[in-house]
Image (spheres, rainbow, N blue to C red):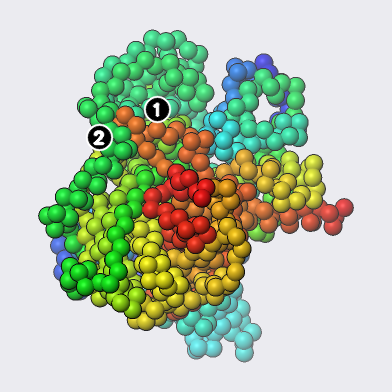
């Protein structure tokens, strides 16, 4: 990307720094940097240079009147490039057909890696101290663990709100000023529309491009005026996605599609028992196979470099490998759950635990309760299984290392690659492609590290492609969890106490919290590490905790002989947004209607990443088989930037959560993952797709996420529907483990 | 040498005839629209047409295509424009990540070629071999019906 020549520095504002300049060819470039602001003492400690920025983006108005937004986010199917472009184009009054989005190259100009690192290794509670700075952008971005990362359902909420709209408004203001000066007319008489400036009484008309150079000479407003939402023309509309045409004719380039002259292809196997090493390898047979050129010992993995994937795969299969597994080969899944349950039992005796919520007097309330209930829930490990297997192409030449891959965090990929081969980060160039699914998996760069090491050893441009078997066996998994509850009702059937103790807390900390007014609450966790690597999986901790909490509240409703929807509703008097979402889902689903034999209806409500989602599931249980027939989803994400995009994300999150609820299970056997491919790690298919209806509630609240919040409520809603249908309570996922022939 | 007609053009391929057609298409011919997903015919990302029928190229050896016609996603559109399914995919805004969509469209195209007005059951049978991890199934179904409907009104 061309950089602006000597960009003019604008004023720092609460929202950010606005700069402007002209690049070669006469294009106007407006840059927005968001930085900590002045009210964040803890942030000052980690920001060494006062000019360090949290988030940058650039908007370019080209001589052809095309507008390009350069954004620090990856497109992995969530439609983020389109939503961000809408936010920019609306404030800029741009012609939507002339707006492009480009992903920013991995460079500190687009994000601040060091700042993110300060939080990465810091206290998870630090961000709370920063609420109020930059409207919480810092908090949200650092919760996503890094910057220039795409995750945490943050792109629209942070970059869109604080970057794209401000950039659009600033550029618009400068263009208007430039035109007013040139035409010697008051700025207020100008109309900006469809990337044109009009002065009606004099009949003058010009493109934005005609004033690009002049606008660059004008100081950007330090506080550009944003549109009133009533004046939005693009935000809030279902603009068509920009990436779709390339995704229907085979031309969209994913990481795996990288092509270079004389490219070698490699594939890899890591020690199947996590943490193990290569003890010995005999590669004689492999090296005799056609096309096999080299075997690279990476210490914990072996890679075969060949002239094509098929030859590399055959070479890998021909290696005789002896692994050193350090005793972990004895771990199986039953042992993992036994470990968790032993830890919880001991914590119960010791009254131990990392306490997140401690309200009222739970012991006294339990003693006083008329009816009590205890329940223990389990979820298994889960793999991400993105459709595009992990891959990365690397080429070391002329003192630099270029990589082509799909990553949720290009800066993280760059740092990981640099460290792996002893390069300076500045000497690593990341070309980020479309991501063939990610769901959190592509925020970890083990595949990038392997690729650069193999390419270095091969001394040739090399594309490393994992098999699906490697993808399932070497993921970073959603953790297996055991979670225990105690609850109690008073003599009127009203819940008065809720205690929850579980193992293995990650992020976000609020995942196990409930919106319900229960006076006595204690929520605590215990560490119980295993050798299985942890990964962020769509919605992170929310996906398992929503299953636990929304199942247990349902169990309490049943205990109270109450309607599960009314029971929840009565506990939401002080949570009007939650109650409205719950009502919308229940009403749309026709809650209370007759369903017929073998059918049941379940409801669940969960807030995550700033969005509140309720889902009502209609399920049929027939000869032990569960069929989810319909899901009604209501979401309050504050405001829907692109309603059809939001609906698509709800459908997507629901399918992802349904696959996990019905089938998803990664289990350990002799220290390694038992499952290997889609035949034993099955996915929901088209003939099992329920009817999905999404109700969008524009509450005007803060913008919430879209990519993740649809997932958490679906598993408990299905489990609750099964209970409604046949009276069986599912306390362990996946549902396919249970014999439902009753 | 294995002679295969790829998207209407006769090509001589020097690759081992046992090589899966998928890798011959991607690595020998450089047509990367056809995707690798599982390698065991479980996900459908590699779907292409062999003499008009949808097949999984990851488990079909190159030799099985000798003397026959292979169509990939790159060969689906004609000079007259996009295949009706490709347009319907855009109209219904089907793709998310997009990685599985070449295979989805190729499976759907083979379906419409034999059943121009497919029932829901036909769609289930033809499409259940294609996994979409982003969960675009409802839109895929709508797009197939849209394309089928337009095909009928044209004809």
Residue drawn at (80%, 51%), measured in percent from left and top?
A: B117
Q: Nearer the viewer, residue A287 or A685?
A: A685
The residue most toward the right is: B155
A152 up-or-down from B83: above or below: below
Q: Residue B90 appears in which quarter of the rendering?
A: bottom right
Residue drawn at (52%, 44%), measured in percent from left and top?
A: A683
- Estimate the x, y position of residue A198 in percent, counting from the top left: 59, 81
- Estimate the x, y position of residue A284 in percent, counting from the top left: 38, 9
Whether residue A95 is visible to the viewer of this picture, yes or no, is no
Q: Secondary structure at mark 2?
A: loop
A339 up-or-down from A264: above or below: below
Whether pointer 1 and pointer 2 mark residues with C-beta atoms closer than 8 Å, the reply is: no
Q: Nearer the viewer, residue A143 or A667?
A: A667
How much space separates mark 1 and mark 2, taking CA atoms? 21 Å
- Estimate the x, y position of residue A5 in percent, counting from the top left: 37, 60
Whether residue A586 is visible to the viewer of this picture, yes or no, is yes
Q: Nearer the viewer, residue A361 or A617?
A: A361
Q: In the visual, does A574 lie left or right of A597? A: left
Which of the marked residues, 1 or 2, is nearer the chain's N terminus?
A: 1
Q: Nearer the viewer, residue A87 or A24?
A: A87
The mark found on residue A422 in the picture is 2
The mark found on residue A268 in the picture is 1
A182 up-or-down from B35: above or below: below
Q: In the visual, does A338 lie left or right of A157? A: left
């Amino acid at each position: 990307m061309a950089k602006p020549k000597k960009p003019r520095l604008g004023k720092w504002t609460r929202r950010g720094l606005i700069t402007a300049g002209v690049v070669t060819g006469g294009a106007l470039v407006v840059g927005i940097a968001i930085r900590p602001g002045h009210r964040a003492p803890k942030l000052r400690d980690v920001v060494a240079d006062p000019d360090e920025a949290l988030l940058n983006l650039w908007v370019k108005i080209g001589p052809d009147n095309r507008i390009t937004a350069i954004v620090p986010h990856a497109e992995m199917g969530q439609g983020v490039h389109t939503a961000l472009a809408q936010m920019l184009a609306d404030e800029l009054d741009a012609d939507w057909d002339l707006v492009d989005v480009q992903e920013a190259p991995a460079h500190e100009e687009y994000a601040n890696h060091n700042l993110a690192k300060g939080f990465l290794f810091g206290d998870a509670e630090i961000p709370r101290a920063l609420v109020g700075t930059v409207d919480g952008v810092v908090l949200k971005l650092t919760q996503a663990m890094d910057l220039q990362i795409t995750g945490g359902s943050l792109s629209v909420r942070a970059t869109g709100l604080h970057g794209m709209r401000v950039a659009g408004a600033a550029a618009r203001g400068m263009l208007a000023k430039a035109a007013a000066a040139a035409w010697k007319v008051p700025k207020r008489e100008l109309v900006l529309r469809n990337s044109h400036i009009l002065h009606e009484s004099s009949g003058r008309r010009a493109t934005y491009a005609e004033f690009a150079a002049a606008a660059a000479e004008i100081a950007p407003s330090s506080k550009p005026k944003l549109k009133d939402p009533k004046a939005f023309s693009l935000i809030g509309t279902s603009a068509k996605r920009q990436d779709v045409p390339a995704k229907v004719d085979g031309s969209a380039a994913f990481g795996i599609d990288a092509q270079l002259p004389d490219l070698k292809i490699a594939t890899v196997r890591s020690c199947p028992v996590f943490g193990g090493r290569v003890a010995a390898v005999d590669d004689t047979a492999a090296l005799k196979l056609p096309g096999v050129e080299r075997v690279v010992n990476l210490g914990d993995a072996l890679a075969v470099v060949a002239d094509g994937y098929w030859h590399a795969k055959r070479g890998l299969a021909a290696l005789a490998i002896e692994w050193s597994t350090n005793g972990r080969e004895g771990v199986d899944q039953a042992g993992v759950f036994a470990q968790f349950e032993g830890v919880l039992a001991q914590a119960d005796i010791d009254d131990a635990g990392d306490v997140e919520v401690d309200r009222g007097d739970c012991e006294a309330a339990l003693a006083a309760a008329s009816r009590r209930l205890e329940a223990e829930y389990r979820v298994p490990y889960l793999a991400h299984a993105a459709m595009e297997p992990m891959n990365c192409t690397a080429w070391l030449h002329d003192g630099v290392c270029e990589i082509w891959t799909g990553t949720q965090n290009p800066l993280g990929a760059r740092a990981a690659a640099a460290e792996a081969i002893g390069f300076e980060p500045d000497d690593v160039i990341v070309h980020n492609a479309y991501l063939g699914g990610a769901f959190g998996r592509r925020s970890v760069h083990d595949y990038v590290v392997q690729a650069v090491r193999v390419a270095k050893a091969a001394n040739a441009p090399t594309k490393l492609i994992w098999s699906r078997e490697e993808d399932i066996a070497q993921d970073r998994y959603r953790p297996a969890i055991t979670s225990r509850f105690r609850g109690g009702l008073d003599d009127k059937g009203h819940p008065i106490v809720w205690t929850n103790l579980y193992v293995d807390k990650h992020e976000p900390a609020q995942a196990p919290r409930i919106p319900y007014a229960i006076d006595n609450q204690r929520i605590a966790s215990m560490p119980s590490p295993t050798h299985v690597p942890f990964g962020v999986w769509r919605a992170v901790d929310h996906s398992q905790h929503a299953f636990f909490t929304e199942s247990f509240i349902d169990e309490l409703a049943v205990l109270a002989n109450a309607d599960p929807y009314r029971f929840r509703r009565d506990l939401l008097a002080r949570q009007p947004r939650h109650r409205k979402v719950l009502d919308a889902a229940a009403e749309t689903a026709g809650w209370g209607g007759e369903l017929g034999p073998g059918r049941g209806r379940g409801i669940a409500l969960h807030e995550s990443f700033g969005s509140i989602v309720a889902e009502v599931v209609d399920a049929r249980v027939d000869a032990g088989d569960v069929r989810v027939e319909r899901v009604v989803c209501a979401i309050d994400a504050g405001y829907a930037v692109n309603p059809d995009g939001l609906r698509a994300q709800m459908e997507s999150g629901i399918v992802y959560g349904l696959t996990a609820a019905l089938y998803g299970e990664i289990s350990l056997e002799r220290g390694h993952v038992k499952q290997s491919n889609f035949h034993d790690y099955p996915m929901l298919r088209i003939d099992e797709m329920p009817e999905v209806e999404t109700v969008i509630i524009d509450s005007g609240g803060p913008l919430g996420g879209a990519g993740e919040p649809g997932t958490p409520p679906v598993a408990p809603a299905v489990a609750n529907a099964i209970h409604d249908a046949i009276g069986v309570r599912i306390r362990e996922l996946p549902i396919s483990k249970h014999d439902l022939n009753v | 040498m294995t002679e295969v007609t790829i998207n209407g053009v006769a090509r001589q391929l020097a690759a081992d005839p046992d090589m899966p057609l998928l890798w011959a298409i991607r690595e020998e011919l450089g047509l990367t629209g056809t995707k690798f997903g599982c390698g065991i015919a479980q996900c459908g990302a590699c779907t292409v047409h062999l003499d008009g029928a949808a097949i999984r190229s990851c488990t079909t050896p190159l030799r099985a295509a000798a003397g026959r016609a292979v169509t990939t996603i790159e060969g689906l559109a004609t000079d007259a424009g996009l295949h009706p399914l490709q347009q319907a995919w855009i109209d219904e805004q089907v793709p998310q990540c997009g990685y599985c969509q070449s295979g989805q469209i190729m499976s759907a195209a083979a379906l419409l070629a034999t059943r121009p007005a497919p029932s829901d059951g036909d769609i289930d049978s033809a499409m259940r071999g294609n996994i979409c991890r982003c969960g675009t199934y409802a839109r895929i179904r709508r797009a197939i019906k849209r394309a089928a409907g337009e095909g009928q009104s044209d004809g």
